[in-house]
Every structure is written in structure tokens, then in C-alpha cells.
Image (spheres, rainbow, N blue to C red):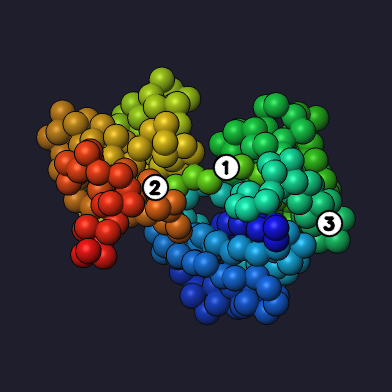
Amino acid sequence: MVKVVECIPNISEGRRLDVVEEIVAEVRQVPGVTLLDYSSNADHNRTVISMIGEPEKVLEAAWRLISKAAEKIDLNQHQGEHPRMGATDVCPFVPVRGMSMDECVDLAKTLGERVGRELMIPVFLYEKAAIRPERRNLADVRRGQYEGLKESIKTPERTPDYGPKVLGKAGAIAIGARPPLVAFNVNLGTTNMEIGKAIAKGIRGSSGGFVNVKALGIDLSEQGIVQISMNMVDTQGTPLYRALEFIKAEAAHFGVPIVGSEIVGLVPLDAMMDVATYYLGLHEFSNEQILEKHVFGF
């Protein structure tokens, strides 16, 4: 069986689309790697890139992408609503076929060592690849963002796993291994960030909400909205519809409407079928039957 791994680098650029295209082109130039998707958001000033292929080929594509992003993105000039600490902010590996999580951890460590040594970019291993338990959670790794990390990286508790203890214009990068997750955002018809923060706190696992949800309130006041930006780390444990219904209920409590939602990047088919099952009331059908009846029209 041919081994297949997915890699989802997030770069800190979502406004200069010509720069995004230059960086994404690095992936396209690696034979045997398939670029699945890339999605830019100007408010977040961030692009999420998804690629798939055999491990060594994906490893090479990730290296080329990180190198180009370090060349093209200056964190000293970067502003955006999404937390970030590097030109390539995160780079996780996800097992797809014939791959174990341990093998993805090995890929993360191999890439991290090379990035730290050749590009002189500080590297923090996170999630399943974390060497230190306090670095499993990405939010803890990225605490203080680029600006705060400039000073804190000099302290023992913030020493990177690879690379120098100093930040250049490319910042630092978190490289890791993890199961699939879904980036799911819900927009509220308000500019009141206190409401957004309260709802994000209510749904976020670390503050007593859903254990499989990471959430932030994002200020998108220029669009007249506040966004609840979520990482759904286990859509079987916490389906997308459950998160949406919770937010709808909390927003109604504040007298605020839901004005939209979005998925960034890719989403497992089963997660979307669960949503269809819930909202169409098709609980008596299997996912395969729903596809045949309501998607393919059989």
C-alpha cells in the first residue's frame, strides 16, 4: 500500500494574493504532490493550504513552501485578526492512508530540524509531535504571538525545539502531527466584541465548553460583524451542527443574529453528512443512502 499523508501549512498572508500564488507555486512544482485547496482571508491576513501525497514528497513540498514564505513575508509588517507568530505559522502533518501518527511525528521532527538548521527559524513542535507536554496545545505555543515571543523566546521555558533563540522577520513556526480537524467560523450580526468573547469562552473546551472545540472571538468590525473562529478537533465527538446550534442559542440570549458561517480548507465527508442528517431529519438513513438520494438524485 502506498503511504499518503496530508500537510496543511498556514501562512501569514491573505491580502497580497500575488505573494500567496508565489508561495503556493512551490507546492505545485513538486512531482507527486497534489494541491488539494488553498483559501485566503484578508481580515485574518492568512492563507490555509492543503496538500497530499507520499511522505517524502510532501516533506519536500512543505520545505519549499516554508522557505519561500520566509523570503516573502515580513512579520514586522504583518497585521491581521488571526493569532500568528511566523511567516509560515503552523505546519501540521495528518495521516491519511497507510500512515501512523508516529510516522507523522517523525516527519514533523525531520522538517523541524531542517528548518531550524538551514533557515535559522525557531521551531516549536506541537500536538502529537510535542516533546514537552506544555506545548501540545497550539494556543500555548503561540502565546504572545510574534511581538511577545521576541522577548520570551530568550527564557528557558520558551526555548525552541530547533533553531535559534532569536526571531528574525520570518518569526517562528509550529510544526506538528495531529488528527484531521475542521476550521469552522460563525459570523454574528454585531460589532460588540464582548459578546463574541463570551460566546467563544462558552464553547471553548479549555474554558469549560465542548472538549473538542478551540474557539476565539475575532473582531471584523469593518464588515459589521464579530466572528467565532473555531477549530473542531474531533467532529465525531462534537459535530459541526452542535457547535452551530450552541452559538445560535447563545447569540439569541444576547439578541444577536447569526449572519453567516464558513469552512476554511477541507472537511471530511462524514462531518458534512452528519450535518445533512441533522438538518434534513434523515436519521433513519445511512450516509451512503443520503448521498444517493439527496446529492446524486438516485
N-terminal-most mark, 3 or 2: 3
Q: Residue furthest top?
A: 208
Above or below: residue 137 compared with residue 112: above
* Image coords of residue 242 (percent x, y): 29, 34
N-terminal-most mark, 1 or 3: 3
- Classify the position of the C terminus by image quarter: bottom left
Q: Disc 3 marks which residue?
A: 114
Q: Disc 1 marks which residue?
A: 179
Disc 1 and disc 3 in contact, CB within 8 angstroms: no
* Residue that appears at 86% across and 61% down: 118
In this rendered view, identify the residue nearer to me: 65 or 96: 96
* Residue that appears at 35% across and 29% down: 203
Badge nearest the viewer, 3 or 2: 2
Above or below: residue 265 compared with residue 191: below
Badge nearest the viewer, 1 or 3: 1
In this rendered view, identify the residue nearer to me: 180 or 127: 180
Q: In which image quadrant can residue 237 be found?
A: top left
- Mark 3 is surrounded, within 10 Å at the Cα level, by few (under 14), some (14 to 19) or many (20 or more) other residues, namely some
Q: Secondary structure at mark 3?
A: helix
Disc 1 and disc 2 in contact, CB within 8 angstroms: no
Q: Disc 2 marks which residue?
A: 270
Q: CA distance from mark 1 to mark 2?
A: 15 Å
- Classify the position of the N terminus by image quarter: bottom right
- Give left or right: position of 91 versus 44: right
* Residue that appears at 38% across and 24% down: 209
Task: Say which amino acid is labelled 2.
Answer: Asp
- Give left or right: position of 33 versus 18: right
In this rendered view, identify the residue nearer to me: 75 or 51: 51
